[in-house]
Image (cartoon, rainbow, N blue to C red):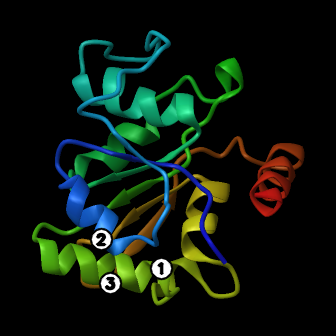
Amino acid sequence: MANRLAYVCDKHIDLESLLDALPSGTPVIDSSTTRPKLKYCGIDPADEDRNHVLQLAFERDATLITSDRRMIEKSLNFGPCGSHGHRLGGVIVLPVGKTRRFTALVKLWDGAIPALGVGRPAFQRIWEDDLGVDLTLKLPTAVELCDCLWGEERERRRRRYKRK
């Protein structure tokens, strides 16, 4: 099944190597050339990661792909969750180095990350459940970034993904 979710690639990731690792046609937004449309209104507006990269992923309802391990922590207190009808779509932290990054993405794509469970495509689960996944660790971890995706909103996301 082709993945129709969108991804934001931050300045820590080489866009060309990322596109090589993802299936053809996967929509990837380059944060170095794309600016957010809305002003960031959360905590610490001077933080570039929050007011640019996370804000861009938030506006696009996209999953952020980075190698900055601090991004999961920043996402946990990003705010403003659910405002303007947008949400973060998860964060994936990749290891440094083209080969290690490629291997981690392939494992993630193939569903070989135990922290994400089995039965659903990993990228879909990260987006649906708004997870932060750290693939730099020997045993990758997944944390829920926002606990507001329950009930109707989570079902809406699942239906939206299946339509594409």
Q: Nearer the viewer, mark 3 or mark 2?
A: 2
Residue 137 shows up from this direction = no
The local secondary structure at tag 1 comes to: helix
Question: Toward the viewer: 160 or 15?
Answer: 15
Disc with the residue nearer the chain's start (2 vs 1): 2
Q: CA distance from mark 2 to mark 1?
A: 13 Å
Residue 142 spot, x, y in % from top left = 46, 67
The local secondary structure at tag 2 comes to: helix
146 relative to 42, above or below: below
Q: Give the amino acid at mark 3.
A: Leu
Residue 20 - label:
2
User: Do labels 3 and 2 touch, CB within 8 Å?
Assistant: no
131 relative to 2, above or below: above
Question: Toward the viewer: 73 or 9?
Answer: 9
Disc with the residue nearer the chain's start (1 vs 3): 1
Looking at the image, which residue is at 61% across and 35% down? Answer: 87
Q: CA distance from mark 1 to mark 3?
A: 16 Å
Residue 139 spot, x, y in % from top left = 32, 84
Residue 1 spot, x, y in % from top left = 67, 78
Residue 136 spot, x, y in % from top left = 23, 71
Q: Which residue is mark 1?
A: 109
Q: Which residue is mark 3?
A: 139
Question: Toward the viewer: 73 or 64?
Answer: 64
The local secondary structure at tag 3 comes to: loop
